[in-house]
Amino acid sequence: MFRGKKYTDSAKLIDRSVQYDVAEAMGLVIKSATAKFDETVEIHIKLGVDSRHADQQVRGAIVLPNGTGKTRRVLVFAKDAKVDEAKEAGADFVGGMELVEKITKENWFDFDVVVATPDMMGIVGRLGKVLGPKGLMPSPKAGTVTPNVASAVKEIKAGKIEYRLDKTNIIHCPIGKVSFGPEKLQENFETLIGAVIKAKPAAAKGQYIRSCVLASTMGPGVKVSTSKY
């Protein structure tokens, strides 16, 4: 795989055989982020669970103390008084059946998060095949199916992120921008990893956190020591 000179130079800063403590790893991620834009810092946590089993799923949502640095566009499915509540809270799009049709007929996806009131799930369910694969389907576990849409919208706008396992039992999540600096990124890191540990399924056996890697959008991965977790 071809890597550019910047990436190769950045990779030289990192010893791939070493697991760094969080503060040191964060410093290396920031140092190796050399793109001309403000790169996103992502965390990749491999867990000792089997996501094929329902009792070993790890999924939830958490508000990062320093946000993600990205403004997320929120679509809310609601009716009656909940429509105004969602709009007042800062939702970007609010509606019902007309939005379902816009998504299905126009292949419209100008949003990052979908929130729905429980009484709208009957019509939102029709979008399962298109929203599901994109990870956009609202769910009670993630707090995106809720009667309290105003609170959900505010939390998402404040930096709430959802974490969930992929098919290879890895959680991938953004924890902020390089410009945040090491302290704010570390705060976000600790908050997220704390939530993942709390979400440990009772059925999980053996070592829970197998490995953890931090990386910026264009930079190399930095292994983080997880022994203290």
Image (cartoon, rainbow, N blue to C red):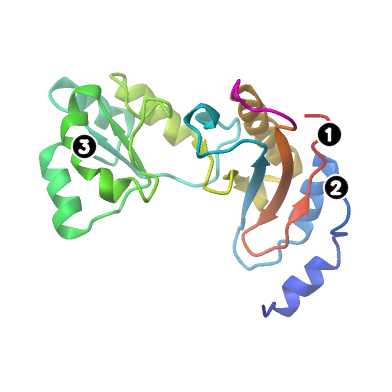
Residue matched to label 1: 227
Q: Is residue 2 above or below residue 146?
A: below
Do the residues under discs 1 and 2 have CB atoms within 8 angstroms?
A: yes
Q: At which x and y percent is residue 192?
A: 63, 33
Quarter of the figure with the C terminus: top right
Residue matched to label 2: 19
Quarter of the figure with the N terminus: bottom right
Disc 3 residue type (three-letter): Val
Residue 168: say if magenta. no
Camera-side residue of 65 and 136? 136
Residue 202: say if magenta. yes
Q: What whole-number distance in Å separates the C-alpha atoms at marks 1 and 3? A: 42 Å
Camera-side residue of 180 and 138? 138
Say which label, 2 or 3, has the lower sequence index: 2
**Which image quadrant is residue 139 in?**
top left
Q: Which mark is residue 77?
A: none
Q: Which mark is residue 124?
A: 3
> Which residue is at a point 60% across and 30% down the rendered structure image?
65
Do the residues under discs 1 and 3 have CB atoms within 8 angstroms?
A: no
> Which residue is at a point 58% across and 32% down the rendered structure image?
64
Magenta region, residue range: 201-206
Q: SS of the residue at dot 1?
A: loop
- 95 horizontally vs 111: left or right: left
Q: At which x and y percent is residue 185?
A: 69, 41
Disc 1 residue type (three-letter): Ser
Q: What whole-number distance in Å separates the C-alpha atoms at marks 1 and 2? A: 10 Å
- 154 horizontally vs 106: left or right: right
How many badges with numbers are in the image? 3
Q: At which x and y percent is residue 90?
A: 32, 34
Disc 2 residue type (three-letter): Gln
Q: SS of the residue at dot 2?
A: loop
